[in-house]
Image (cartoon, rainbow, N blue to C red):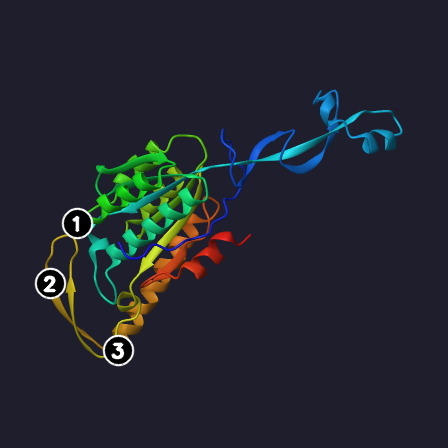
């Protein structure tokens, strides 16, 4: 992997957790950030009685102060290793995915969260799987194991196995892929992950997104390996760009109401820009 950078992120919604950390939790108690006051009869804790709120109440209700506890969460990267992820144009897409996964592993464990990873193509790849851990060494070692894999196979259906392996407890999930999947699989993927806070990270190569207006391109079918020359011209280039824009809109539509909006990463990723998008309200 290249030099690892730090990526900031902010989970959305509330997460139940058993360990103190940096994020908002669904739990309330006697310590943490002040949240509100509540009647003593509902939360009988004499140590947290709020005298000012109690004295102000005209009905003599006794109030206690409640605090929002902070929690560590589980962060997972789901990494697509199907054949199209092996495309190398302006950049090596697979290497970008590995570098991105490494940055997330480093950042999550540095933040006190647990990090896990599932790599998949037609099925889940067991040798490139790691349940969530606080060990930075173990997390980065799992990313290195992904790095020696070779993208292959004609399907990313293993994503559904990865979603099932996450379980029902809410997690922050980074879904890393080029998302060149059938529409039905994209719909199934977001439905399967709807319990979690999902951030789709869409890897795009500038050569794919906007090919030159003139020239001969050699297209390679990532599934069969078959190569075919293509004479590019302005009209074809325009249709190509329109098809790519339509694909992005369809992906955004499929993810709406089930996950965050897709974050499109063209060629390499900039840690500062990605952090800004992941921490935006």
In the picture, measured across the screen, residue 23 lies left or right of residue 129, that is right
Q: Which of marks 1 and 2 is nearer the N terminus?
A: 1
**Is 108 in front, or is 185?**
108
Measuring from the top left, give residue 183's x and y in whole percent: 32, 49
The residue positioned farthest toward the left in the image shown = 226
What's the CA distance linking mark 3 and mark 1?
A: 32 Å
Label 2, secondary structure: give it. strand
Q: What number is the disc on residue 213?
A: 3
- In which quarter of the view is residue 273 placed? bottom left
Dot 1 crowding, Cα within 10 Å, few <14, some 14–19, many 20+: few
Residue 157 location in percent, x, y?
Answer: 26, 41
Query: In the rendered view of the protein, which quadrant contains the N terminus?
Result: bottom left
Q: Nearer the viewer, mark 3 or mark 1?
A: 1
- Front-most of residues 70 and 82: 70
| Pointer 2 or 3: first along the chain | 3
Q: Which mark is residue 150?
A: 1
């Amino acid at each position: 992997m290249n030099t690892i950078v730090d990526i900031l992120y902010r989970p959305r919604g509330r997460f139940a957790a058993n360990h103190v950390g940096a994020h908002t939790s669904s739990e309330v108690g006697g310590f943490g950030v002040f949240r509100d006051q509540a009647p003593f009869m509902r939360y009988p804790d004499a140590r947290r009685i709020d005298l000012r709120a109690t004295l102000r109440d005209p009905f003599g209700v006794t109030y206690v102060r409640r605090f929002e506890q902070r929690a560590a969460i589980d962060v997972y990267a789901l990494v697509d290793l199907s054949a199209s992820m092996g495309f190398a144009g302006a950049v090596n897409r697979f290497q970008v995915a590995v570098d991105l996964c490494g940055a997330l592993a480093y950042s999550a464990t540095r933040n006190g969260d647990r990090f896990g990873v599932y790599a998949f193509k037609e099925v889940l790849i067991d040798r490139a799987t790691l349940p969530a851990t606080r060990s930075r060494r173990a997390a980065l070692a799992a990313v290195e194991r992904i790095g020696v894999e070779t993208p292959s196979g004609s399907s990313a259906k293993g994503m559904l196995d990865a979603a099932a392996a996450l379980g029902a407890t809410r997690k922050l999930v980074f879904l890393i892929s080029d998302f060149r999947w059938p529409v039905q699989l994209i719909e199934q993927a977001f439905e399967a992950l709807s319990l979690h806070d999902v951030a789709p990270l869409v890897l795009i190569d500038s050569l794919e997104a906007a090919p030159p207006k003139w020239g001969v391109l050699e297209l390679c079918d990532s599934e069969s390996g078959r190569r075919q020359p293509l004479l590019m011209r302005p009209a074809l280039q325009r249709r190509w760009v329109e098809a790519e824009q339509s694909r992005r809109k369809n992906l955004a539509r499929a993810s709406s109401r089930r996950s965050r909006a897709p974050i499109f990463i063209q060629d390499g990723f900039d840690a500062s820009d990605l952090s800004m998008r992941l921490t935006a309200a």
